[in-house]
């Protein structure tokens, strides 16, 4: 069993944070201590004089151990724009993220690392999310929002993950659209097209119940 995973998705706003929180609850149900990490976040608000991001705050709240915000989110950019633009004056340095991850891994049994945007989203002028995941050398979990266009997006992202050489630990179907037609057929088509396990189908919820969502998962 891996001690950390990198959570990516087919796009921004596909359910990566919800999936990461569900996975955190899943491992907690197994009796593990769990931390979440959002190394790079664009779109922050001032909290007690520090820039903080909503996703990272959620990961901090749902962890089984309390750690400093800076370890969970070393790069917190004010503007909700691509990190290579938002972070022009403080670009992401992979070593800094790697060090923070090592500290988190020394504190908890499992660390779930949420990416930013999709697999090829730039994190600085030279590097993309894929480079960050490769540097951290983590198995990847891919979140697919089940909506029109998802088959194409799932196949493209899966191929790109495979091209990076990282192992894909599986994928999650996130039902973000309550009006999606033929949802099961779409999920079945994606499952057939990908050579990686479906870790769970997370149903649409008006209000998130992460313990319930966690019970829809099977990892490893
Ligand atoms: N299972 C679900 N049921 C209902 N709504 C969902 C579900 N999963 C996600 N959503 C909705 O989609 C939104 C985006 O989800 P989430 O924040 O997890 O995406 P993300 O990929 O982490 O986005 P970002 O790229 O901003 O980090 C949520 O705020 C929620 O409103
Ligand atoms: Mg998110």
Image (cartoon, helix red, strand yellow):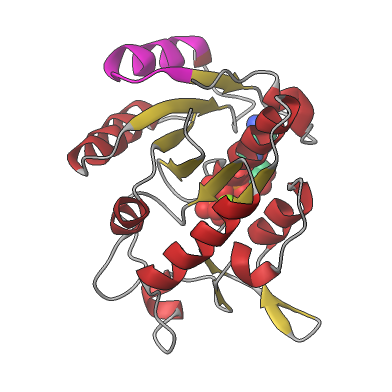
Residue with the most extreme bottom position? 89
Q: Residue at x 65, y 67 (%)?
A: 53
Q: Locate ligand 1 by image quadrant.
A: top right
Image coordinates of residue 177 in percent, x first then y, are 59, 31
169 or 52, which lies in front?
Answer: 169
| Residue 24, quarter of the rendered image | top right
Check if residue 95 falls in the magenta segment: no
Q: Residue at x 59, y 70 (%)?
A: 43
Note whether 180 is above or below 17 in the view shown: above
180 or 167, which lies in front?
Answer: 167
| Residue 112, quarter of the rendered image | top right
Q: Residue at x 69, y 33 (%)?
A: 32
155 or 31, which lies in front?
Answer: 31
Note whether 57 is above or below 50 in the view shown: above
Which portion, as a residue range, is magenta? Answer: 184-198
Side (left or right) of 61 relative to 94? right
Image coordinates of residue 159 in percent, x first then y, are 22, 34
Image coordinates of residue 201 in percent, x first then y, are 57, 19
- Mostly what secondary structure, the magenta segment? helix
Image coordinates of residue 59 in percent, x first then y, are 68, 52
Note whether 132 is above or below 82 in the view shown: above
Side (left or right) of 108 relative to 6? right
Side (left or right) of 79 relative to 116? right
């Amino acid at each position: 069993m891996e001690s950390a995973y990198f959570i990516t998705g087919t796009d921004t706003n596909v359910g990566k944070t919800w999936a990461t929180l569900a996975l955190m609850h899943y491992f907690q149900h197994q009796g593990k201590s769990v931390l979440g990490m959002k190394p790079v976040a664009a779109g922050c608000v001032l909290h007690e004089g520090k820039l903080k991001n909503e996703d990272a705050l959620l990961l901090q709240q749902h962890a089984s151990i309390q750690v400093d915000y800076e370890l969970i989110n070393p790069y917190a950019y004010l503007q909700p724009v691509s990190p290579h633009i938002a972070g022009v004056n403080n670009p992401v340095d992979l070593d800094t993220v790697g060090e923070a991850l090592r500290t988190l891994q020394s504190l908890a049994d499992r660390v779930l690392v949420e990416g930013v945007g999709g697999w090829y989203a730039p994190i600085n002028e030279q590097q993309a999310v894929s480079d960050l995941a490769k540097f951290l050398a983590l198995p990847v979990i891919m979140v697919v929002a089940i909506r029109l266009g998802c088959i194409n997006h799932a196949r493209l992202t899966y191929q790109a993950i495979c091209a990076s050489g990282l192992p894909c630990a599986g994928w999650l179907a996130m039902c973000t659209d309550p009006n999606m037609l033929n949802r099961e057929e779409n999920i079945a088509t994606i499952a057939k097209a990908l050579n990686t396990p479906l870790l769970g189908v997370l149903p649409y919820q008006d209000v998130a119940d992460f313990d319930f969502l966690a019970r829809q998962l099977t990892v490893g």
